[in-house]
Each structure stands twice: as C-alpha cells, then as structure tokens.
Image (tube, helix red, strand yellow):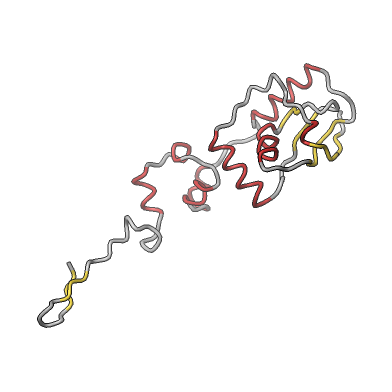
Amino acid sequence: MIKWKLEKRKLSELKPYKKNPRNITEQGLKDLKKSIDKFGLAELITINVDNTIIGGHARYQTLKASGVKECDCLVPDRKLNAKEVEELNIRLNKNIAGVFDFDILANEFEIPDLLEWGFTKAELGISDIDIEKFFSDEQNPIIQKKPEKIICPKCGEVFEK
C-alpha cells in the first residue's frame, strides 16, 4: 500500500496532468474560491513525486489565480506509474463513494444556503417559484408586499392601497 506524506510545494513547480478529463465551470471556480477564502485549503492537492497533479486541478487553478505561491500537497512515498496515475486521477475525480441524501438536505438545511454553497436549482429539483417559498417575508422583497400608504391631504387620514 502506498503511504502519503504532507509536503509543501511551490505552485509554480506543479504540473497539471495532461490526461485529466475533468473540467470545471466558471461558477465552480467561483464557488471553490469562496470555500477556500472562508475555510482555507481543507482538501489538499494530490501530486506524484514529479509534481504532476493527480487530483486537485481546480484547487490549483484557484490558488494560483489568488496569488498563492505555495501550498501543502499529498505526495506518495514512491513514484506512481502511468497506469496508477490514470486510475487515481479518475477515482479522485469520480466521487464514487457516496451520493447525497436529498431528504436530509431538504429537512436539515436551508435551500438558500445550499444554493450559496454550490448546489444548482436543477440538482435540488426546484424552480424559481419554489425558491420564493423558502425565503421569509423580511428577506424577500418579491414576497414582501407592504401596502402602499396614502395620506388624505384634507383630513390627514391614512389609507392603505
């Protein structure tokens, strides 16, 4: 079994894996930047001993764009061969270990939070109309329709329109 160690590496020395089949969207990069800005690099970049990135290309892009010069990386205790790098890259990017329990998401989390944290409306199976239901009257000016007040210029009585 391969043992992994934590090593600090300069981002300028890291090399993206040419066969990485995973693309990240502009929105995905924005969401990742928010996460890293708030929590730091909670999930490390995985590299081979030759500094080739195996997992964490989006984290690498985000850190580099933010002006970070170096970061902690996970490095194997021996050089992985081409087939091992291929397999590990796919396994790290596939996220095959689990799926979200949407009942827990719906009952234990706030929809606006989930949207802010990177879920899309499509992933949550909701429409724009549904979203309005999750905001309180105070938070959502669309739902919050305060009656317009009209003051009678003669008697000063206040009416609601």
Q: Using the image as rendered, state which of residue 88 and residue 24 is in the foreground.
A: 24
Who is closer to the viewer here, 156 or 137? 156
**Residue 8 at x, y percent in the picture:** 84, 40
What residue appears at the point 64 percent right and 28 percent down from the top-left corner?
94
Q: Position of residue 61 (x, y in %)?
A: 67, 35
Q: Measured along the vertical axis of the image, is residue 148 above or below residue 111?
A: below
Position of residue 67 relative to residue 161, above or below, is above
Left or right: 69 in relation to 4: left
Q: Quadrant of the N terminus?
A: top right
Residue farthest left in this picture:
154
Q: Residue at x 70, y 27 (%)?
A: 91
Instruction: Give residue 56's quadrant in the image.
Output: top right
Q: Position of residue 147 (x, y in %)?
A: 23, 66
Outermost residue to the bottom: 155
Give the residue at x 15% y 80%: 157
Give the quarter of the image for residue 48: top right
| Residue at the limit of the structure toward the right, as seen here | 77
Q: Nearer the viewer, residue 126 or 62?
A: 62
Question: Percent position (x, y) of residue 97?
Answer: 66, 33
Number of residue marks: 0
Q: Residue at x 66, y 39 (%)?
A: 65
**Quadrant where the C terminus lies?**
bottom left
